[in-house]
Every structure is written in structure tokens, then in C-alpha cells.
Image (spheres, rainbow, N blue to C red):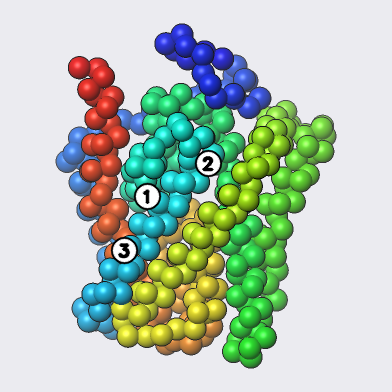
Amino acid sequence: MRTAAGTASTVPAPSLGDDPGEQAPSPPSRGSPWRSTLVAVLALLAFAVVASGHPNELHRLGRAAPLPVLGVLLTFLGARALQAEVLRLLIGGGRISRGEGFLLMMLASYTNLLLPRLGLGTTAVWLKRHREVDYARFATATAASTGVQISVVGVAGLAAQAGLDRLGRVPADWLLSLLFAACGLGGALAMACAPALGTLAWPRRLARWLVAMAGMAREWRRAWLGLVALHGAGVVLRAARLWLAFAALGARPDPLGILLASALADLALLASLVPSALGLREAVILSAAAAMGVEPSLAVAAAVLDRLVWTLAVVAMAPLATFRLLRPAHEART
């Protein structure tokens, strides 16, 4: 496979990318700084509209303790750094620096404020243009990594619920247990069955995708433990971030309840059709108030504080990420 410049690409593409009828995604327009600023303001306004439905709870935000709020910020940035390591593991650590990976994750978080998973397209286009990573390979790698993430989140949620039930704090909900068990087993089962499913007389595109996934699973057999460890650390960091949001408001919720709420929030974020699961994430955290041992009003305030901190961080860092990631290409043209 050769690039437009005529040099051989060092990244092998899965069979899905060899389909001549498949069109590569169109690169998004960079737009003007004013447009980017307007988009950021509109995203924050949408968040404010959702939060305004709980005026009696939001007065707590003005009394949030600074140090835990700083902890919320640092754990969010740490989780983004872990996602950058996941990206480097998927495409090869030598092809992208840690700094570039972190900035790409921040830019992806920013674009996800517009549409769910829009950040994947931004990342794919940048990697294609600057690191010659094929669209098909990136898409297949991302799907595999997401499967691992869902499995890890499912196991974490199931363990949290089992712990709460065993300690007699909150009885186990069999529907939640079934959901977490399905998530925990689903990703691993799909990867294990992919070679056999790919031989069935299914639609050609689905069969080719399954075969590609099976090939990449064999290629990455040494990297699976790394993916599990990185996604597991991400689950812990996101749970710690939620706990710190409660701590900033003077509460000390049950750690197992926090892990359960965070796992539910992760699944809401992965499945949501709303940008950054706006409103849905807060709703699932509210539903876990009893497991965390806190009042529902406090759960709403903590969820809002958490979102406010990381949203402001993303909006503040997006211009820097855009400048640093696009500047090399601009200098190359000039």
C-alpha cells in the first residue's frame, strides 16, 4: 500500500480498508477561531440549561473546596493521558509522542462536545495526514479497544455491586448485574468468536470487519494486557474524580458506591447519542445516590461540579491543542 506521496506505508491495513467501494471520511474543516469560540460558548450554554433544572442544589457549587476541585481537574487530565497511552499502544508508540497523543485526546474531548464520538473522526484525520495511519486500521483498532474498555467497566461495576451487597449496604439489583455481566463478557466473547463468525454467510461487509478484528486480535495478543491495565487505571481515575467532586462539597461517599456510579456513567457516555452524555450522565449518577450513601440533591451537585470542571478544562485547552497539532503542517506548507 502506498501513500499519496509515493512512499510505502509502514502500517498494514486490515482487509476492510481494501474495499475499493469504501470511501475514506472527508477531513473536517478547521473553521475560524471565532467559530470555535462560538461552539464552545453554545456547549456551555446547553450545559447551563440542563443544570438550571436544579437551582436548589447548585448553590452548593459556590462553596466547593479548592483542593478537591483541583484534584478533579488533575484526575481528568490524568485520564486523558491514559487515553493517549491507549492510542500510542494501538498505532505503535514510536509513531506519536506522548505530548501529541495527549493533545489529540483533549481535542477529541472538545469536538465530542458537538456530536457524540466526533472526536474519533478528528483523531483519524490527523493520524492519516501526519502519521499515515489508515482509516480502516484506526477504526478497527478503536472498536477493539472500546470492546476491552466496555469489558473492564462491566467487571468493575459487577465487583462494586457484589461488594455493596456482601457488606449489606445496598441489595444487588439483578438487572444491573445482568447489564454489567453482559458488558464484562461481551467484548471478550466477541473477540474469541470473531474468526468463526467471519466465515458465516453474513453480509459481506460485516464478515470482512469480523475477519479484520480477528486478525488484529492475533496481532495484538501481547498488547491485550496493556489495554486492560490502561482501561482499568482509567476506571479507577474516573471513580476517584467523582469521589473528589463529592469531597469538594463536603461529603465522603461510599467508595464502592462511587465505583458503581462511575461505571454506570462510563456506560452512559459510551452509549449516549447526546454530546458528552449531557444530562444522561448526571441522571445515572443521581440514580446511584443510595449506593453512595448521599442525598440525591448532593449527587446532582457533585455531577454538575465534575462536568463543569472538565468542560472548562477542555474549552481552555482546545485552542492550544489545535495550534500545536496543526502548526507543523502549516510550517511545512510555508
Work out how far the residue at label 1 is from the one at label 2, CA to CA, in angstroms. 19 Å
| Residue beneath disc 2 | 89
Residue 140 can be seen, yes or no:
yes
Tell me what residue is drawn at x 53 percent, y 54 percent.
230
Q: Position of residue 244 (x, y in %)?
A: 37, 74
- The structure residue drawn at horizontal position 43% and vertical position 70%, both measured from the top left corner, is 240
Task: Examine the rendered structure and indicate whether residue 65 appears above or below residue 209.
Answer: below
Residue, x 61% and y 83% (percent of image)? Answer: 164
Q: Earlier in the sequence, mark 1 or mark 2?
A: 2
Q: The residue tagged with tag 2: helix, strand or loop?
A: helix
On residue 109, the disc is 1
Q: Foreground: 154 or 115?
A: 154
Mark 1 element type:
helix
Q: Is residue 186 above or below residue 117?
A: below
Residue at figure coordinates x 35%, y 74% from the top left: 245
Q: Earlier in the sequence, mark 3 or mark 2?
A: 3
Quadrant in the rendering for residue 310: bottom left
The foreground one among 326 and 120 is 326
Q: Residue 101's x, y, as percent?
A: 39, 41
Quadrant (top left/top right/bottom left/bottom right) for the C terminus: top left
**In the rendering, which numbered label is found on residue 73?**
3
Determine the CA span between mark 3 and mark 2.
Answer: 25 Å
Could you tell me if residue 150 is visible in this image? Answer: no
Cβ–Cβ under 8 Å for marks 3 and 1: no
Inspect the image, locate mark 3, and give the three-letter code of the amino acid beneath it. Leu
Residues marked 1 and 2 touching at CB (< 8 Å) = no
Say which amino acid is labelled 1: Ser
Query: On the picture, is 273 further left or further right than 60?
Result: right
Q: Earlier in the sequence, mark 3 or mark 1?
A: 3
Nearer the observer, disc 3 or disc 1? 3
Residues packed near mark 2 inside 10 Å, few (<14), some (14 to 19) or many (20 plus): many
- Can you tell which of label 1 and label 2 is closer to the viewer? 2
